[in-house]
């Protein structure tokens, strides 16, 4: 909770003082984990893998403002355009064999306010519900808070997208409310659910991520022994 201070000039309540330094913008860095890695999207290297991973699975695009794509060429052209954007800044999620299985972006980048958002997350079925799917979120959050210096990390999704809603809570974001009639996407109304994680909340979230990702948290079949929320709540 943020406690109000009083302005010495007029006695009105004001927020606590904050270091005005700016955060850094995302860059073409490679983030290496135990189960895979995250690196800047490169259409020339990642397009074929990503198309193989998502083709035929049109439901991964349901809540996106783009997709599904009719063929590899159209998908590749779209991917080239995404690579060229600085906001959103796109990353590919790779397995230990350097096969690209998904995309995530850092977007709505406001370095002066030290606010940034994780969004445009496209996880192929092969990536979904795997340790790497969670590890990619951990790697990006650590990069945002510890390397780039942001103080607020946002997550937004269609309020009807229950998977994204649950994922945000699972990763340690706090639900902040719904913006009604926020967008028109593919000709349909979108109410947007807002979540955020703050810099002082990150150490606890980081500790939970790291404990969950330990190999001993998975049985011989790769099933988790403790849920991420259970670990975080116990800290």
Image: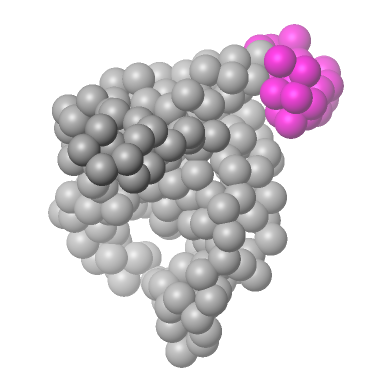
The stretch drawn in magenta includes residue 193:
no
Q: What residue is at 35 percent from the left and 20 percent from the top?
A: 146
Q: Which color mode does the image show?
A: one colour
Estimate the x, y position of residue 65 in percent, counting from the top left. 42, 73
Estimate the x, y position of residue 57 in percent, counting from the top left. 59, 64
Estimate the x, y position of residue 225 in percent, counting from the top left. 83, 21
In the image, residue 99 sits, relative to residue 183, either above or below, namely: above
In the image, residue 215 sits, relative to residue 74, either above or below, namely: above
Q: Which residues are magenta?
A: 212-235
20 or 100, nearer to the observer: 20
> Can you say which quadrant of the picture contains the C terminus?
top right
Estimate the x, y position of residue 62 in percent, counting from the top left. 56, 71
79 or 48, nearer to the observer: 79
23 or 56, nearer to the observer: 23
- Residue 7 seen from this side: yes
Q: What residue is at 23 percent from the left and 25 percent from the top?
A: 19
Q: Quarter of the image holding residue 115?
A: top left
Q: What residue is at 52 percent from the left and 56 percent from the top?
A: 194
């Amino acid at each position: 909770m943020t406690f109000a201070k009083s302005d010495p000039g007029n006695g009105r309540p004001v927020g606590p003082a904050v270091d005005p330094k700016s955060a850094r913008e995302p860059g073409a860095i490679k983030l290496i984990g135990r189960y895979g890695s995250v690196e800047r999207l490169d259409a020339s290297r990642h397009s074929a893998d990503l198309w193989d991973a998502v083709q035929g699975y049109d439901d991964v695009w349901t809540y996106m403002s783009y997709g599904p794509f009719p063929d590899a060429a159209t998908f590749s052209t779209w991917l080239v355009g995404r690579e060229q954007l600085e906001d959103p800044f796109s990353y590919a999620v790779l397995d230990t064999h350097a096969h690209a299985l998904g995309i995530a972006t850092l977007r709505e980048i406001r370095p002066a306010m030290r606010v940034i958002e994780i969004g445009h997350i496209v996880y192929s079925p092969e990536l979904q519900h795997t340790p790497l799917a969670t590890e990619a979120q951990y790697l990006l959050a650590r990069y945002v808070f510890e390397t780039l210096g942001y103080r607020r990390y946002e997550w937004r999704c269609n309020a009807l997208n229950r998977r994204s809603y649950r994922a945000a809570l699972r990763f340690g974001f706090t639900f902040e409310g719904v913006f009604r009639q926020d967008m028109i996407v593919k000709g349909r109304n979108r109410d947007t659910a807002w979540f955020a994680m703050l810099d002082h909340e990150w150490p606890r979230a980081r500790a939970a991520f790291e404990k969950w990702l330990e190999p001993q948290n998975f049985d011989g079949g790769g099933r988790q022994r403790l849920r991420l929320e259970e670990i975080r709540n116990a800290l």
